[in-house]
Image (spheres, rainbow, N blue to C red):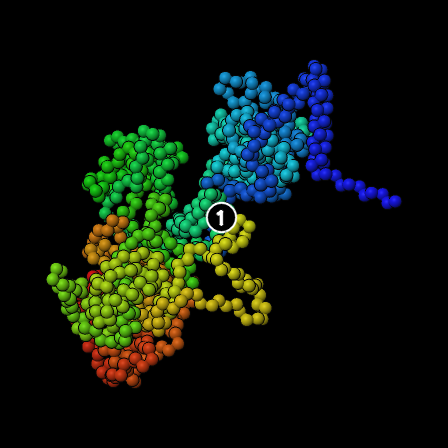
Amino acid sequence: MDEAAPTPPDDQDFRYRVRRDAGGAFARLKERLSERWDNRWFRLASYALCGVFLAIALFWLIFARGLPDAATLLQYEPPLPTIVRDINGQPIHSYARERRVQLQYADYPPMLVKAYLAAEDKTFFSHHGVDFPGFAGAVVDYVSKLGSGQRARGGSTITQQVAKNLLIGDEYSPTRKVKEMILAWRIENALTKQQILELYLNQIFLGRNAYGVQAAAQAYFDKDVGELTLPEMAYLAILPKGPANYRPESPTGLARALERRNWALGEMLSNGFITQQQHDAAKATDLGTVAPHGSPYGTAGGYYIEEVRRRLIQRFGEKPEDGPNSVYAGGLWVRTPMDPEMQKLTTTALRAGLQRYDAGKGWSGPVGKINIDNGWQREMAASSIGIDYENWRIAAVLSRDSNAARVGFSGGETGILPREAAQTPYRRIGGPAFNGLKPGDLIAVARNGGNWMLRNVPEVSGAMVVEETRSGRIHAIQGGFDARLSAYNRATQAQRQPGSTIKPFVYAAALDSGMTPASIIVDGPFCVYQGGRLGQKCFKNFSGASAGPQTMRWGVEQSRNLMTVRAASQTGMERVVKTIKTMGIGDYQPYLSFALGAGETTVEKLTNAYAMLVNHGRALSPKVMDYVQDRRGKVIWPDRWRPCDNCNMPNWDGKSMPRFTPEGRQLMNPMTAYQVVHITEGVVQRGTATVLRDLDRPLFGKTGTTNGPTNVWFVGGSPDLVAGVYLGYDTPRSLGGYAQGGRIAAPIWKQAMAPILAKMPKTPFIAPNGIRMVRIDRRSGKRVYGAWPTDDPKAAVIWEAFKPESEPRRTIRKDEVDAQEKVAAARAASAAGRPRNDGDFIQQQGGIY
């Protein structure tokens, strides 16, 4: 008989038995706890265990909750300054709010590390973030000073200091101290001892705006860490506790510094880091610090440096929260095309030109004012006004009596300015400048024996830019007399009327519309009706005279206003202003006055437009930066930057030379651009800029003078470099009737560019494909056969540039050319000694609208 199969358990019955069994277990546990709870020791142990759990929870809530992750220090990047380099790769400036140089642990000398261990944390390599005996002493010191207002000693290890400086801040409270200990323990688990020391030595503040030991070594001893001596290392090791206490500039600070340094040397001896002989020799050494000094870089190119800073901030931001590549924390390396020699020559030439113009006009007044009642040294430092010119200095007038004025300088020293050393007439109020001095005035002075002498900063200002014609790289910018006197960069920020320097672009539009350099344009009265409200507008040349029909070339060379407005009218002002806008000069309304320079532009824009003419009308972007690297050396700007492989090979490898494709789109017909350049070569040879002719090389350019005259200009250059310069008051007013572009601006250009160009080969302006060079009579524009151009700038026969099928069909015989030359010579002889007329004046000066 088969056994019956087991009956599967009923599901409800199964759940019941589970609950019954569980309930029984809980009942038995409750019964046993009840039996044990009667035991006094069991109750105390239970209370203690609950207290421990509660304490741990409270401790976590109060101290450990929300603390930063110590592992983030593995990716920590300290704020680093941005370093600017010149065209040669040499550092020339740094943008920094914290002077810091980041080094690796291996870069620090072992003895320097030992000095910091002896002074700060002698058990660093044996503890795990917290030195408990030292901490206990700090607790006792804190309790003993409660209510006294005194600050207890820290008792922090180097690891705790890293946690404080980089993760939680410097709040003075027991809570912060506990958090610091927790983080120190976590840091020791996340980083090696060497990594912790590297962070510490790169981050710690040591006075004189120096963050990190390398920056402090440069600030106090003008050395790198590898060059420090033992006593110098010991001095730097005492600074973390309070750099202000050990300032060697004051007698008290010097005494404290020597005492504390010697203590550090004793600690190094007791720890076995140095021998007794080393200790004694170091202790007998003077402190040897250098005087506080500013940036290790020079002050040249202040306007250029400021323009680079402005563009970097626009692109990358200023503060750490603006991104990892911010200007003052990102540690960028910026390569610029600034040429130190060109910058120096440009600065010198512009300053000399400003002083030539301003000479004899009297003292222009103080360069600034401060409130000496608030502490004149602090006020002078806050003003940031200085000067970098010869032996001049900025001084504050502290007091004045009938015989002398007492002046003070930013370093704290004072001096005497005698009455007789300030007798220059004060142009604003009359009388000697000494009478106009008031306490609080900031003035320029120079050493005169044992006293000081008043100097004058020109009231007039100006700017100059030097740009490369093939790339748009700017090699020099000078935006005023001195960037420390005024940060306003007149080269890139000042909107000025360009006057006749706009005319080449007016004629470019005319050439694009069918005219040629030999086209005849009437130099005669020209009026336009402007409507019932404005009536009729008539234009004129400088003196009202006119010369009749002349070639376009002659009109440009002699800067004839009537010919310009007539050409603009025939071309159409819509086309003219479109050309001006396309070349990046300005966006103007189609009014004829803009053809004579009534609009506004900057030196940078106009110089770049002239450079594009030399570049055959291809677009250029003015560049003050070649490329920008992050702190690791990766190029982060321009976006599509790529290196030129094999460009810097020491020897040719026999392969084809690396070549760059032209950048920028075509903005102007290349033949038109060349025609304009070729015409304006005549401005230098026989026009309004003949002052440059003796440079004896291919040059082009155009002078400019505006109504008033309020601005004088010259823009031009060689096939390789173009420079633009203007001079005028910041608040436009008349410069005087004698002020003209050819008389004031062109000599400034010449002084700066002559030594620059002298080092460059004499190369001609290259014509683009399609240009036809034809012999013409310079005055009539007729084609010449049987005669050839000569080197004489006033030769009757010249080469002229024409587009295909546009050369003149009219001809002139050689005997007619010779006859014209004789007539011209006779007129020149008869004009000698008589008053200059309009033609003579315009022959040498810039046009005025």
Q: Is residue 285 left or right of residue 763?
A: right
Asked if 342 appears above or below 527 in the picture, the reply is above
Q: Is residue 350 visible?
A: no
Report the number of discs: 1
* Residue 547, picture quadrant: bottom left
Q: Is residue 624 left or right of residue 362?
A: right
Q: Residue at x 41, y 65 (%)?
A: 664
Q: Residue furthest front?
A: 1
Q: Residue at x 27, y 39 (%)?
A: 422
Q: Position of residue 36 (x, y in %)?
A: 72, 18
Which of these two is toward me, 369 or 472?
Answer: 472
Of the 4 image quadrants, the one containing the C terminus is bottom left
Q: Position of residue 319 (x, y in %)?
A: 45, 43
Q: Please state which amino acid type lies under the numbered disc 1.
A: Asn
Which of these two is toward me, 11 or 731?
Answer: 11
Which of these two is toward me, 608 or 444?
Answer: 608
Q: Residue at x 37, y 32 (%)?
A: 377
Of the 4 image quadrants, the one containing the N terminus is top right
Q: Position of residue 612 (x, y in %)?
A: 37, 65
* Residue 652, picture quadrant: bottom right
What kind of element bears circle 1?
A: loop
Asked if 33 appears above or below 482 in the picture, the reply is above
Residue labelled with disc 1: 325
Q: Is residue 730 visible?
A: yes
